[in-house]
Image: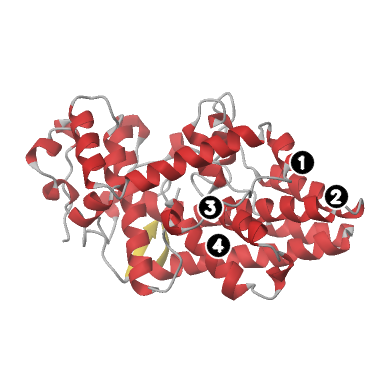
Amino acid sequence: MPLENTHLSVANEILNTTLKKELSIFESPELKQLFLVAHYVPDIFSVLNETEYISSYLHGFGSNGEIVNPNLLILNLLDNCVELRVKEKDGEALANFAITMGIVGHGETDIDNHPWIYSLEGIDPLKNDYEESRYKHWLIEGLLHRLWVEMNPLYLNDITKVDWSKNIFSNIGTFLNRIGTSSTLIEKAFKEHLTLFQDFKSDEVYARFTDLAKKGEKPICYLSTFDAHLTLMEGILQKGVLECRHPVTGTVMNEIAVPDIIKDSILSTAEIIKASLEYFNQGTSQARAACVEMIRPLNWSTGFEKYGLADMKDQTKHNKNKLGNWYGRLPSDMQDLFPIERRMITSTA
């Protein structure tokens, strides 16, 4: 998952610039807020045991570990929005449309970013390096967001600075019923997630998490998303054009500059929203068919249709571009948190 602040940046650009005219249908502050927060709703479900399965499904994991692609669920949610519009339940229709389009944006950003992140990360489940992989995955996402903000300083880029006091989760009962949860649980998950991101800005909480990780009571991956840790790692993700290798086959997929990864997500999301607006407003089979064509049947976690995380292979030894010496930046007592056989140092920084 690109970090929540990156999802928020994508949402803000679409709402206030790319589709400012088209999304003027979200007239109230509550609808605007709902569209913004919906861009990271798929991640907030992961913080509660009662809703974790929703996040897993959206990101590509079925209840039995099978690969799933959530495009059909999204189309079904969109159908529900059209049905509400036909029934002249416009308030509920708009609220459900706002959260559905936000989820579309989340998926598109994941699909565009994850192959590139895995190319640098070097995940390989057969090597049992899950904790190191998660650490590097979140670290890359955090550094990617910092580069994006550096290049676009006026972007809304911090979820902790947004006024979320409005009642944004009312009127989305159809959406909640379809995904199998309640307004009580989504509000609880959202508040816990927001608190977590507030904690990431605290040096005191960072010190406490570091101590817990040393005791084996917290996963080491949580350290990588703290502001203090990202500052420690500043510069290991190089600017400019980076090579992206297919995380299964190892073939070169493309070469892309860091800001263009995010721009691609903005453009692809905007095109789907425009097509969805046509369907929302017209309700025709032709307009729906256009949505079917555009909502990609791809796994959010990997960015591919037929590959799950278990299929990933470490391609870092073939990469023209490397993630810098993250291990060397760590204090010695943090280095000890990684198994000695997995202390891979591939440095260009």
Judging depth in this view, the residue of 313 and 52 nearest the camera is: 52
Which mark sits nearer the N-terminus, 4 or 3?
4
Dot 3 falls on a residue whose secondary structure is loop
Q: Which residue is mark 4?
A: 11
Say what amino acid the circle numbered 3 marks.
Answer: Trp
Residue 31, image x and y in percent?
67, 58
Kindly report the distance in space between the C-alpha atoms of the residues bearing marks 2 and 1.
9 Å
Q: Is residue 237 toward the left or the right of residue 304 in the image?
A: left
Residue 143, image x and y in percent?
31, 57
Kindly identify which numbered label has been placed on residue 84.
Answer: 2
Dot 4 falls on a residue whose secondary structure is helix
Position of the C terminus by quadrant = bottom left
Say what amino acid the circle numbered 1 marks.
Answer: Thr
Task: Spot the residue most to the front.
Answer: 165
Kindly report the distance in space between the C-alpha atoms of the residues bearing marks 2 and 3.
26 Å
The residue depicted at 83 percent of the width and 56 percent of the height is: 90
Tags 2 and 1 touching, CB below 8 Å: yes
Circle nearer the viewer, 4 or 3:
3
Q: Callout 1: few (<14), some (14-19), or many (20+) C-alpha neighbours within 10 Å?
A: some
Q: How many marks?
A: 4
Q: Which residue is mark 1?
A: 174
